[in-house]
Image: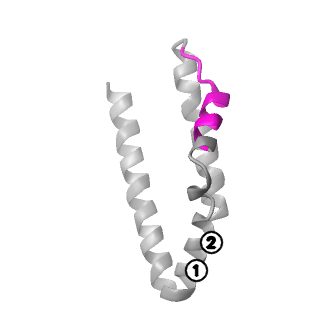
Amino acid sequence: MTIRNREAYRRSEALAAVPAEHGITVDFDVLKETRLKAGWPDKPAPVRQALARMLVGADFIAVHMSWDAADERSATAAANRLVAM
């Protein structure tokens, strides 16, 4: 999961470079402020996931990874569509 988090971070950096190539500035301070305004509801997510893993078992991890695989496929399809456009 840590590796997936790092991959997502690197991907977001790469995607942020696309608007910059077209003269659009991405203000990361504004993005950070927006995320901070979301408040604490997102903070306990890792704890909830760990508890779910303990309660549900290995099936939880399988479902989570399947969901991530579907997410990756849709991201790839979106990127391919952008390239085609």
Left or right position of 3 against 41: right
Question: Residue drawn 56% across and 72% down?
Answer: 48
Neighbourhood count class around disc 2 (C-alpha, 10 Å): few under 14, some 14–19, many 20 upward: few
Could you tell me the amino acid type at mark 2?
Val
Position in image of residue 73 (x %, y %)? 38, 53
Q: Quadrant of the C terminus?
A: top left
Q: Most extreme residue toward the top, as rendered? A: 23
Q: Is residue 78 magenta?
A: no
- Compared with 33, 85 (above or below) is above
- Compared with 14, 61 (above or below) is below
Q: Which mark is residue 7?
A: none
Q: Is residue 34 magenta?
A: yes
What secondary structure prevails in the magenta region? Answer: helix
Question: Residue drawn 38% across and 29% down?
Answer: 83
Colour setup of the view? one colour
> Magenta segment range?
24-35
Q: Which mark is residue 47?
A: 2
- Compared with 60, 20 (above or below) is above
Q: Quadrant of residue 27?
A: top right
Q: Are marks 1 and 2 in contact (CB under 8 Å)?
A: yes
- Residue located beneath label 1 in the image: 51
In terms of secondary structure, where does tag 2 sit? Answer: helix
Question: Residue drawn 61% across and 65% down?
Answer: 44
In terms of secondary structure, where does tag 1 sit? Answer: helix
Q: Quadrant of residue 33?
A: top right
Position in image of residue 77 (x %, y %)? 35, 44
Q: Quadrant of the N terminus?
A: bottom right
